[in-house]
Image (cartoon, helix red, strand yellow):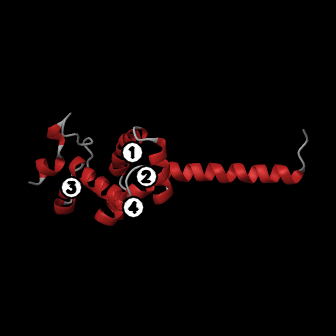
Amino acid sequence: MRFNRRQLVVAGLSAAVLSAGGFGLYTAPARAARKALAASFGDDVANHPETTRFLDSYLIRYRAAARTTSRLTRLGNQARTWGLPLYDAAQFGGDVVQTYLTSTNVVLVAENGEDLAFVALRDPYASPCTNQLSANWL
């Protein structure tokens, strides 16, 4: 089977578009999470290395939760939200901010100017004492 130049160009462009779309779907939760944190706490906090550590841990848990849902549900959500397999953008942003508040000392950063520290993702069942919001502020 021989391919002419037009068929090779179309195949190459199709592969490029599909790979760019797949990359966009994979990075959409990370971009949306950083955007939600920047809207709540500012760009300095959103681009801090400890925030990157938090997002790495958070997105592992998020993608694991997404794998437990049906494929049809994930595809429907990705089509509606341009890449988020779970939740809509408002729910996702709220969950990211709430988890960030209870996993880092961002309140102390805002009040006292301390350096930002990510402890661990708060899991009320596995480690209830890691709630940084109640440990440092309340």
Instruction: Identify the mark nearer the N-term, 2 or 4.
Output: 2
Secondary structure category for the residue under label 3: loop
Q: Is residue 74 left or right of residue 111?
A: right
Q: Could you tell me how far apart the alpha carbons at marks 1 and 4 are, in whole angstroms?
A: 14 Å
Q: Amino acid at mark 2?
A: Ala
Q: Amino acid at mark 4?
A: Lys
Quadrant occupied by the C terminus: bottom left
Q: Is residue 83 left or right of residue 8?
A: left
Q: Could you tell me how far apart the alpha carbons at marks 2 and 4 are, in whole angstroms?
A: 9 Å
Residue beneath label 4, please?
Answer: 35
Q: Residue at x 29, y 53 (%)?
A: 95
Residue beneath label 1, please?
Answer: 59
Instruction: Identify the mark nearer the N-term, 3 or 2.
Output: 2
Q: Could you tell me how far apart the alpha carbons at marks 2 and 1 are, in whole angstroms?
A: 7 Å
Q: How many marks?
A: 4
Q: Could you tell me how far apart the alpha carbons at marks 1 and 3 are, in whole angstroms?
A: 26 Å
Q: Is residue 62 above or below residue 125?
A: below
- Quadrant for residue 137, please give it: bottom left
Disc ID at residue 114: 3
Q: Is residue 120 above or below residue 25?
A: above
Secondary structure category for the residue under label 4: helix
Residue beneath label 2, please?
Answer: 30
Q: Could you tell me how far apart the alpha carbons at marks 3 and 2 are, in whole angstroms?
A: 25 Å
Q: Residue at x 43, y 39 (%)?
A: 67
Q: Residue at x 37, y 48 (%)?
A: 55
Q: Residue at x 33, y 46 (%)?
A: 54
Q: Residue furthest left?
A: 138
**Circles 2 and 1: CB distance less than 8 Å?**
yes
Secondary structure category for the residue under label 2: helix
